[in-house]
Image (tube, helix red, strand yellow):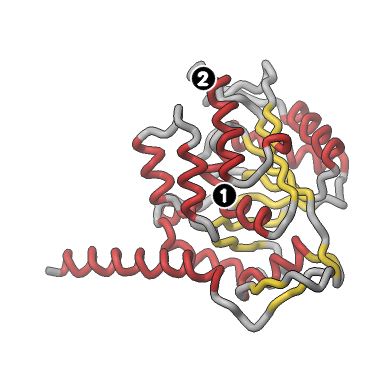
Amino acid sequence: MAFILIIASLVFLWIVSLCKVLLLPRIPFGNHFTHNNGNASFFVSPQFLLFLISLVFSGRAFRKRNALLVIAHPDDESMFFTPTINFLTSKGHNVQILCLSIGDADGKGNIRKQELFQACVALKVPMQQVKIVNHPDLQDGFGKVWSHNLLAKIIEEEITRCCIDMIITFDSHGVSGHCNHRDVHYGVCKLLHDTLQRDIEVWELVSTNILRKYSGPVDIWLSIFLAMLHTNGTMQCLVNEHSRRSVIAMAQHSSQWVWFRKLFVALSSYTYMNTLRKV
């Protein structure tokens, strides 16, 4: 009987959390902001307030941002970053995606390139704003060491080409611990250290422990609480306004859309929210 009560409680908590994820972005709150054209306005919840101020607004006027999402493999954007992508695109910001390999570990690199373009269409990111690098020294795979100097050089070129003023990437653990994810993080850090790009904001996706990682929407409660503790705005929680879009985008990666990745998308907290930390 006790076991049944525990299971029922967990199911109830999951449903309540999912409802909060789905309904929270649509609930009007007292605080609202108007774009400088005076026509468009939108409401934000308290946990979005500081993030909107720090990322979206500069002074009193709305400022369109050029954000560069730096990932290691095709499908990283759909598995881990869809809440961030959905947030930025829904607010009218430019999102550029720099994928630093074609994901050719299984010899499917050319297929995975096309899948990434299709996924970005589902995520409302124009194909011309997606760049995929196929460098002989940046090949997908565990045990493949990527040069941080090379990564910094490629990222810097993309920053210059696209007039980037914000970078979003993995943290030092890389969510899954994949060495390529971690190298991307250190490549960005190398760039910041060497060039002192103080006019560019850098945000990293916070890795969580395995319990939080596979708690699905339930993690929203702790994520919001931890973000609110950082009153200086250095950590923000973004709730996915379009969770279904995460599934649609990941399904475009048909060569990777196997049963355990379907489970990952359903159970992963990264489908429902992203916690970003300022570097």
> Does the rendering let one see residue 143?
no
Q: Which residue is mark 2?
A: 108
- Quadrant of the snapshot with the N terminus: bottom left
Task: Give the residue at the far front of this rendering.
Answer: 39
Quarter of the rendering containing residue 211? bottom left
Using residue 95 as the reference point, say whether residue 11 is left or right of it: left
> Does the rendering let one see residue 147?
yes
Tell me: residue 68, above or below residue 140. below
**Between residues 114 and 188, which one lies in front from this camera angle?**
114
- Number of residue marks: 2
**Residue 219: % across, % down:** 45, 62
Report the Cα–Cα distance between label 2 and label 1: 23 Å
Tell me: residue 137, above or below residue 36. above
**Residue 247: % across, % down:** 46, 46
Quarter of the rendering containing residue 145? top right
Q: Label 1's element?
A: helix
Q: Which residue is mark 1?
A: 82
Residue depicted at x 61% and y 54%: 86
**Between residues 64 and 51, which one lies in front from this camera angle?**
64
For badge 1, the amino acid type reads Thr
Residue depicted at x 55% and y 71%: 26
Quarter of the rendering containing residue 278? bottom right
Q: Are marks 2 and 1 in contact (CB under 8 Å)?
A: no
Using residue 201 as the reference point, say whether residue 80 is left or right of it: left
Disc on the earlier residue, 2 or 1? 1
**Residue 158: % across, % down:** 80, 35
**Residue 125: % across, % down:** 66, 43
